[in-house]
Image: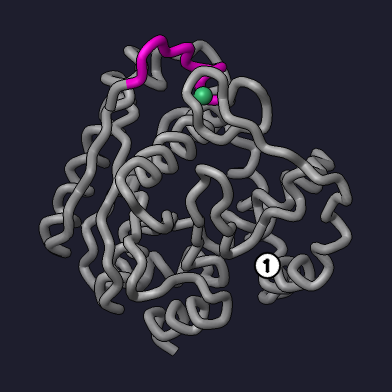
Amino acid sequence: MKLEEKVKKSIEKYKMLNKDEKILVSVSGGKDSHTAAWILKKLDYNIELFHINLGISKFSEISLKKVKELAEILNVPLNIVNLKDITGKTIEDLRKKHCSICGITKRYLMNRFGYENGFDVIVTGHNLDDEVSFLLNNLLNWSIRYLPKHLPVLPSHDKFLKKVKIFYEIEEEEILEYAEKEGIPFTTAKCKFQKDAITVEHRKYLNKLKEYNKNIKKQFLYGYLKYRHIFELEEDFQFKECKICGMTSAGNICSFCRVWKIKEFKW
Ligand SMILES: [Zn+2]
């Protein structure tokens, strides 16, 4: 089956998207998010692109160039935000924990941008390999609160938009093959901080296991979907509004505001 057909089936199976929704696709410059935008456009969904310039030398420049090429070919609006304009700093200016802060920052900015600009849903390029490596990581840490959340669709609540992973069931190598065949512009440049991320090691390990059992990743993922209810906590968790920015937050101050300490937020 062709990749577009597989994605179409996932969209139907998990009720991911509707044709009347305004969709913001978060694009990084890499193959996964670019292929997500490419396929959604082919399937005639109403999409715009969103890109954050993180200010990581060389990596951010080449990423931005590829994002612009993609937007031009697809002929869809491209929304670019610069981290430095908003926070006064880049990811490079941080002293530590680049990957976790980068993750917090990207999730916050794409959600806030989508929320403030009337989008219904955010689509990311996360694939099966991403999902199982993050799942394994959360299991190793026994991060109970995150364990029920490895889903293809996270519904909207409060000021959080719906989030959809159209490649939830698709392996990375299949996306790469498709992107090359279709001539989708993307960069293979890796962020220089990525080596800090333990999930990169999990991916290598899971690929090694695939030599023994080629279905190991899918087995792990579908088994999880079958049994994930055992991780759902009984507690009735109440979200709040961040006292600084007003966005939905687990605590009094959201993690974005805690990290960046911005006095006045401007795009
Ligand atoms: Zn905040």
Judging depth in this view, the residue of 255 and 181 nearest the camera is: 255
Q: Would you name the residue on which mark 1 appears? A: 217
| 210 relative to 122 in the view: left or right | right
Residue 158: x %, y % from top left:
56, 45
| Count of number-bearing discs | 1
Classify residue 180 by image quadrant: bottom left
Give the vertical position of 267 relative to 11 (above or below): above
Secondary structure of the residue carrying tag 1 is helix
Q: Residue at x 40, y 74 (%)?
A: 18
Say which residue appears at 35% left-offset and 20% top-offset. Answer: 265
| Residue 201 point in image, percent of width and height | 64, 44
Residue 258 placement (x, y as % from top left)? 56, 17
Q: Is residue 140 visible?
A: no
Per the rendered image, the range of residues in magenta is: 255-265
Query: From what the image shows, is residue 141 above or below residue 42?
Result: above
Q: Is residue 205 above or below residue 201?
A: below
Does 259 lie within the magenta span? yes
Whether residue 77 appears in this view of the structure is yes
Tell me if residue 41 comes above or below residue 87 in the rendering.
below
Q: Please give left or right for residue 156 compared with residue 85 in the image.
A: right
Q: Amino acid at mark 1?
A: Lys
144 falls in the magenta region: no
